[in-house]
């Protein structure tokens, strides 16, 4: 026997990793510090822990335990934050529901995840009532009775009364093992039924620690919830902010003026969001001529921010951190770490550096770009396309009740993202497209992201998407869909094409431009499948 293996695990030298421990620590270290600011109440860390314990005990008293699913249909709120601790304290699995989904999709999710409890804001009561028509087994219904008032007889109990009747002791069973499921998040795929992505306690703990370090967070952090908490558990920041003893500032609806007011009122230091959120805020604040009194760090997920957006953000006072990840990777898996030598670069060149997806986060074991045919790493030449593949502790357990999809996702021992990218000589990754979005024109590959980058540089363009359009000569050519920044009819197809000709190789210039509102998924992603359907013969 190996002499080192004689030293085994004991309760003294080994503990199950779970982000629930973050709240317990912060409630000890910062008991009277403001943990959560919401519209109806402000909570200290002591109160935050107490309410989370009440929720755990209320669930236990209702017979909810190990691996039972508890669903939440609420906007960003203290109730959602309490669920991120109280539900796993009870040993149960948290399923945060996208509040923008339709009843049929919500019904599918509740059935597929076998939710035993549904906590919902009464502002969604009519949606819940419709959803229940397609649910096989009615869950226990708990109503959060806030702005929309009391439940109209649908709920079994009100949330506040339910918590008030429960014990405050911190005695929930918690996870039996750190590999136990902590949450269930459904993808927002543009076709077919969503897939249920299962997270474990270990991954959630490590993702939160990594996220806090990636964003330079500490106990002075004041975080504004512009990112939905239902999206990848708020990219793990539901746990990360608590880990560092920061302050959560809740925001129920994304509104540019309200975001500005809360940043100024509470001294917000950090916020996250999709490109559409950043673009909306920049457009509105730019129109009003407003600037932040103190810089705020904005972590941007989704598509790479165009250089024009990064420049505008800096002028208003936002310092951009570009993150890359997927639902399957607990949100962020890579970030664009700024290098000291970038400081002296001209603004346009610096913006191009910052727009890359960068290098792996600390919780990811490895991230690489592999040739899709051979599975071998592509050369680091900034030119050769391959697929981003990831492995490590912050990759999902798998897709719930979908072994075939899980096997495909973990092909060759990696999580296969479906995103096409290149690797630069400095090891930084740069996405060029989704595998299904690359345009092959006359044998040449055209990155839709490259064309979109050029489109976003036009000051009259608010949003842009580029898809392939059939062409008798070239097979495929780019077609651009753009949403104008100003609804005055001044933006024309000819203006866009002339603009692109100045910035792109001729074969990459869109052959057609459609101006108008762009269709989006419930999480704000542009639905390119609908745009392609519009071009179908």
Image (cartoon, rainbow, N blue to C red):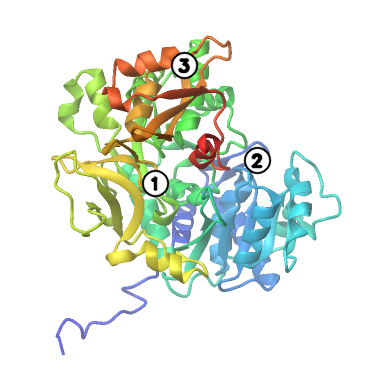
Q: CA distance from mark 2 to mark 1?
A: 46 Å
The residue tagged 3 is 493
Please state which of residues 128 and 393 is positioned toward the viewer in this rendering. 128
Labels 3 and 2: the sequence-earlier one: 2
The Cα atoms of the two marked residues, 3 and 1, are separated by 26 Å
Q: Can residue 382 be spotted in the picture?
A: yes
Q: Are marks 3 and 2 in contact (CB under 8 Å)?
A: no
Q: Which residue is painted at 31% across and 46% down in the image?
A: 420
Indicate whether 277 appears above or below 80.
Answer: above
Of residue 366 and residue 86, the one placed in the foreground of this image is: 366
Instruction: Give above or below for 303 relative to 435.
Output: above
Q: CA separation, marks 3 and 2?
A: 50 Å
User: Residue 154 in the image: x percent, y percent?
Assistant: 82, 55
Residue plotted at (42% across, 54% down) = 330
Name the residue that disc number 1 marks.
436
Residue 145 position within the rendered picture, expressed as x and y whole percent measured from the top left: 76, 46
Looking at the rendered structure, the secondary structure element under dot 3 is: helix
Nearer-the-camera pick, 453 or 285: 453
Q: Is residue 73 left or right of residue 413?
A: right
Quarter of image, res 304 = top left
The crowding category of the residue bearing disc 1, from other C-alpha atoms within 10 Å (few below 14, some 14 to 19, many at least 20), is few
Residue marked by disc 2: 41
Q: Can you tell which of label 3 and label 2 is closer to the viewer? A: 3
Secondary structure type for disc 2: loop
Question: N-terminal of the two: label 2 or label 1?
Answer: 2
Q: Residue furthest bottom?
A: 1
Q: Which mark is residue 490?
A: none
Q: Residue at x 74, y 43 (%)?
A: 123
């Amino acid at each position: 026997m190996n002499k080192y293996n004689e030293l085994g695990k004991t309760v003294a030298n080994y503990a199950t990793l779970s982000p629930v421990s973050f709240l317990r620590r912060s409630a000890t270290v910062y008991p009277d510090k403001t943990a959560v600011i919401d519209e109806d109440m402000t909570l200290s860390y002591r109160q935050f822990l107490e309410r989370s314990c009440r929720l755990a005990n209320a669930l236990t008293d209702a017979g909810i335990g190990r691996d039972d699913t508890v669903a939440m249909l609420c906007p960003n709120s203290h109730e959602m934050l309490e669920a991120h601790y109280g539900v796993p304290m009870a040993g149960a699995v948290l399923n945060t529901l996208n509040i923008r989904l339709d009843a049929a999709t919500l019904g599918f999710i509740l059935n597929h995840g076998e939710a035993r409890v549904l906590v919902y804001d009464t502002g969604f009561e009519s949606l819940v009532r419709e959803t229940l028509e397609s649910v096989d087994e009615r869950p226990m219904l708990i109503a959060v009775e806030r702005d929309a008032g009391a439940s109209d007889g649908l709920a079994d109990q009100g949330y506040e009364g339910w918590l008030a009747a429960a014990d405050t002791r911190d005695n929930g069973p918690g996870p039996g093992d750190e590999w136990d499921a902590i949450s269930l998040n459904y993808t927002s795929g543009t076709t077919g039924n969503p897939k249920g992505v299962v997270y474990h306690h270990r991954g959630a703990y490590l993702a939160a620690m990594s996220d806090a370090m990636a964003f330079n967070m500490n106990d002075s952090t004041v975080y504004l919830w512009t990112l939905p908490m239902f999206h990848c558990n708020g990219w793990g920041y539901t746990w990360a902010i608590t880990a560092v003893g920061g302050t959560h500032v809740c925001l129920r609806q994304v509104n540019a003026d309200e975001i500005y007011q809360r940043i100024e009122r509470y001294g917000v230091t950090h916020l996250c969001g999709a490109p559409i959120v950043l673009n909306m805020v920049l457009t509105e604040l730019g129109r009003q001529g407003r600037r932040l009194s103190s810089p705020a760090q904005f972590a941007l997920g989704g598509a790479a921010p165009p250089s024009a957006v990064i420049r505008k953000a800096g002028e208003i006072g936002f310092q951009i951190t570009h993150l890359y990840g997927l639902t399957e990777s607990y949100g962020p898996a890579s970030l664009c770490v700024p290098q000291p030598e970038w400081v002296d670069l001209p603004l346009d060149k610096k913006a191009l550096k910052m727009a890359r997806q960068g290098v792996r986060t600390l919780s990811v074991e490895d991230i690489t770009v592999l040739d899709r045919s051979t599975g071998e790493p592509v050369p680091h030449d900034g030119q050769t396309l391959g697929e981003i593949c990831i492995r490590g502790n912050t990759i999902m357990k798998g897709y719930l009740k979908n072994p075939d999809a899980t096997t495909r996702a973990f092909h060759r021992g990696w999580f296969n993202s479906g995103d096409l990218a290149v690797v630069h000589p400095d090891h930084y990754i740069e996405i060029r497209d989704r595998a299904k979005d690359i345009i092959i024109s006359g044998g040449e590959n055209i990155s839709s992201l490259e064309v979109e980058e050029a489109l976003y540089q036009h000051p009259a363009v608010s949003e842009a998407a580029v898809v392939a359009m059939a062409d008798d000569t070239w097979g495929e050519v780019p077609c651009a869909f753009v949403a104008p920044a100003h609804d005055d009819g001044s933006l024309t197809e000819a203006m866009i094409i002339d603009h692109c000709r100045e910035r792109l190789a001729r074969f990459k210039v869109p052959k057609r431009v459609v101006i108008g509102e762009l269709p989006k998924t419930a999480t704000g992603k542009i639905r390119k499948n609908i745009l392609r359907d519009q071009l179908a013969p």
